Amino acid sequence: MINNVVLIGRLTKDADLRSTQTGKSVANFTLAVNRKYKKEGQPEADFINCVAWNKTAELLGDYTRKGSQVGVEGNIQTRNYENNEGQRVYMTEVVVQSVTFLDSKKENSQTSPYQKNDYTSNHFESGSNAIDINDDFLPF
């Protein structure tokens, strides 16, 4: 049997990063994924619950924010639990095995935990240090 899911979408809110009692990191998030077809000219989206564990969860917590575009690969899993009112709650979610950050560096710079270095240098700007190269050394 095959149970493999690949999705590209945007986070509907910041990932909820927590730790279990045993110290494992877990991140829950919802991914908005556009449908192929539009209704009345407007795109429709599905909102898919996802969960990531360990290092993948930490990366999502550190490098994504609401609206971040990501690609996820994982599998569909169902589970159930009893809530505080004693009702049985059933959930279907994607258990994320890998994540790809799809925002451009410019968009992602606002969410990055490190400082961006804006210093650029053009070594050819002055033009005073011309290099004399014999045509025999050129590969074309």
Image (cartoon, rainbow, N blue to C red):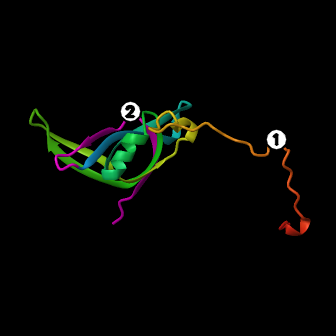
Judged from the image, the secondary structure of the residue bearing numbered disc 2 is loop
Mark nearer the viewer, 2 or 1: 1
x, y percent for residue 61: 36, 41
Does residue 33 appear in the picture of this structure? no
Judged from the image, the secondary structure of the residue bearing numbered disc 1 is loop
The CA span between labels 2 and 1 is 48 Å
- The residue pinned by badge 1 equals 126
Number of marks drawn: 2
Within the magenta stretch, is there residue 9? Answer: yes
Whether residue 99 sits left or right of residue 50 in the image: it is right
Whether residue 128 sits left or right of residue 7 in the image: it is right
Q: Are marks 2 and 1 in contact (CB under 8 Å)?
A: no
Which quadrant would residue 32 be assigned to in this image? top left
Give the mark nearer the N terminus: 2 vs 1.
2
Residue positioned 21% across, 44% down in the render: 90
Which quadrant would residue 118 be assigned to in this image? top right
x, y percent for residue 101: 48, 46
- Image quarter where the N terminus lies is bottom left
> Which of 109 and 104 lies nearest the eye of the viewer?
109
Q: Amino acid at mark 2?
A: Lys
- The residue pinned by badge 2 equals 13
- Image quarter where the C terminus lies is bottom right
| Segment colored magenta | 1-23
> Which of 65 and 3 lies nearest the eye of the viewer?
65
Residue positioned 39% across, 44% down in the render: 60
Does residue 135 appear in the picture of this structure? yes
Residue 31's mark? none
Residue 47 in the image: above or below residue 93: above
Residue positioned 63% across, 38% down in the render: 119
